[in-house]
Image (cartoon, rainbow, N blue to C red):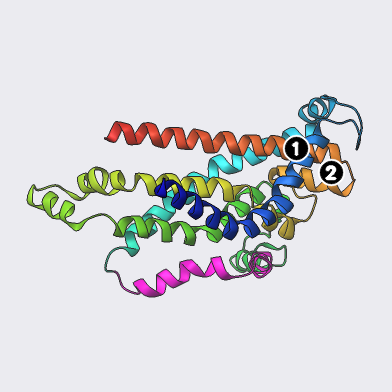
Amino acid sequence: MKLYRLARKELLVALVFLAPSLAGFSVFYVIPFGQSILNSFQDRLGGSFTLDNYRELLLSSSFQKAASNTFWFTAISVPILVALSLLLALLLNQRVFFRNWLRTAYVLPLVVPVASIVLVWQILFDWNGSLNAVLEHFGYSRHDWMKSEWAGFVIVLVYVWKNIGYNVILFLAGLQNIPDQYYEIANLEGAGPVRKLFGITLTYLTPTTFLVVLMSVLNSFKVFRETYLVAGAYPHDRIYMIQHYMNNMFLSLDIQKVSSAAVLMALCITALVIILFRTERIFRSYME
């Protein structure tokens, strides 16, 4: 009985401390998203129930283009980001020259404001930017990077540069948690670098890798800020994302389509997260 009272008292104390955060999260996230779900099933604000919003959204060529670009951006940029992050973490985990300086350099994009980052990339890839000046110096013609198919490559580059530092930190934390005796035993048994990499390092980095993949996928849906500031509200077709579509529908006050697109994007993200967690659970049970 005393244990039950103690547990109940601790629960009440925890709820008291969590109440401000839960209230803020509900007011700014849960309630607005619930209202968006309600609006997505109405023909107008306060109107009757309908599924026409989702039907029109899925048949819209603009939405199809935005969804396709978002899918391909995530499918291409996330593997590149995870692979480069792992390689850099393995490098920084060794005794290399300027290791502390390199660690600081990869963390800097996390603390630099987005507007400053975009200004740098604008200077680099603008028609009169630094990259075109270098190309012209070596006899090549200027290229309009942000208004051609190269725009997708630029956005992937910006996304990788912005998020690689955070992933490197996570991988370094995972690498430093691997016991050294595993590598010592492998050395005594004559295991080579490749065998140690796949048999020890990557095996014990599995939880960290899934976390990095999850965070990278979520961050790939936040690339709208950089894309919008670099290319504006109507960028090249190659980098027209779902967030652009939602932003344009909001500016035209088409609340029903904005709400429908937000609900579909939330469902896609939730499905990806569930798939990743299921995959991690299956892989972990297989390793055990």
Give the x, y percent position of residue 3: 40, 48
Q: What residue is rendered at 57% in x and 42% in y? A: 74
Task: Name the residue type under label 2.
Answer: Met
The answer to whether the residues at label 2 and label 1 have Cβ atoms under 8 Å apart is yes
Residue 261, numbered circle: 1
Q: In this orientation, does residue 239 appear?
A: yes
For the stretch drawn in magenta, what is the main secondary structure?
Answer: helix
Q: How far is disc 2 from disc 1 in space, using C-alphas?
A: 10 Å
- The answer to whether 181 appears left or right of 110 in the picture is left
Residue situated in front as seen by the camera: 22 or 82? 22
The quadrant holding residue 21 is bottom right
Q: Crowding at label 2, few (<14), some or many (≥20) Cα neighbours within 10 Å?
A: some
Q: Quadrant of residue 237?
A: top right
Q: In which quadrant of the rendered image does the N terminus lie? A: top left
Helix, strand or loop at label 2? It is helix
Position above or below: 264 against 200:
above
- Residue 262 x/y as whole percent: 73, 40
Task: Give the residue type that dot 1 points to.
Answer: Ala
What residue span does the magenta drawing correspond to?
96-123
Mark 2 = which residue? 249
